[in-house]
C-alpha cells in the first residue's frame, strides 16, 4: 500500500468540541436510560390505564408554555 492509499490520521477534536460531544453523549445516555426504565416498567406491570396517565395535549401545552417563558417576549 502506498502512502496515498492510506486514510489520513484522525485528528483529535478541539477541547470545546470534545466537551460538546461528551455533553451530548451524556444527554443521549440519560434519555436512553429513561426509555429503558419505562420499557422495563411496562414489561413488569403492563401498560398503565389511560386514566392514570397525562394526556399528551396537556404535556404539549405545558412544554410550549415553558418554551414561551424561556424565550421571552419580543416587541
Image (spheres, grey):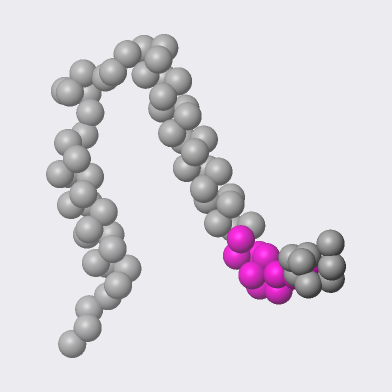
Left or right, 3 with reference to 52: right
Name the one closer to the observer, 49 or 18: 18
| Residue for point 78% across, 72% down | 4
Is residue 10 something one can see in this rendering?
no
User: Is residue 18 magenta-colored?
Assistant: yes
Q: Which residue lies furthest to the front in this view?
A: 1
- List x then y, in percent, for residue 15: 71, 71
- List x then y, in percent, for residue 32: 49, 38
Compared to 30, does 48 lie above or below? above
Mark count: 0
Q: Which residue lies furthest to the right in this view?
A: 2
| Residue for point 22% across, 23% down | 52
Compared to 25, does 70 lie above or below? below
Compared to 65, does 59 lie above or below? above
Compared to 32, does 69 lie above or below? below
| Residue for point 46% across, 35% down | 34
The C terminus - image quarter: bottom left
Q: What stretch is highlighted in magenta?
A: 9-21
Left or right, 26 with reference to 72: right
- List x then y, in percent, for residue 58: 17, 44
Name the one closer to the observer, 72 or 15: 15
| Residue for point 64% across, 57% down | 22
Q: Residue furthest bottom?
A: 75
Amino acid at each position: 500500500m502506498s502512502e496515498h492509499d492510506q486514510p489520513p490520521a484522525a485528528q483529535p477534536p478541539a477541547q470545546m468540541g470534545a466537551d460538546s460531544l461528551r455533553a451530548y453523549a451524556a444527554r443521549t445516555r440519560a434519555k436512553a436510560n429513561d426509555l429503558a426504565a419505562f420499557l422495563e416498567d411496562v414489561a413488569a406491570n403492563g401498560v398503565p390505564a389511560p386514566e392514570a396517565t397525562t394526556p399528551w395535549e396537556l404535556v404539549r401545552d405545558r412544554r410550549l408554555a415553558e418554551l414561551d417563558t424561556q424565550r421571552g417576549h419580543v416587541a
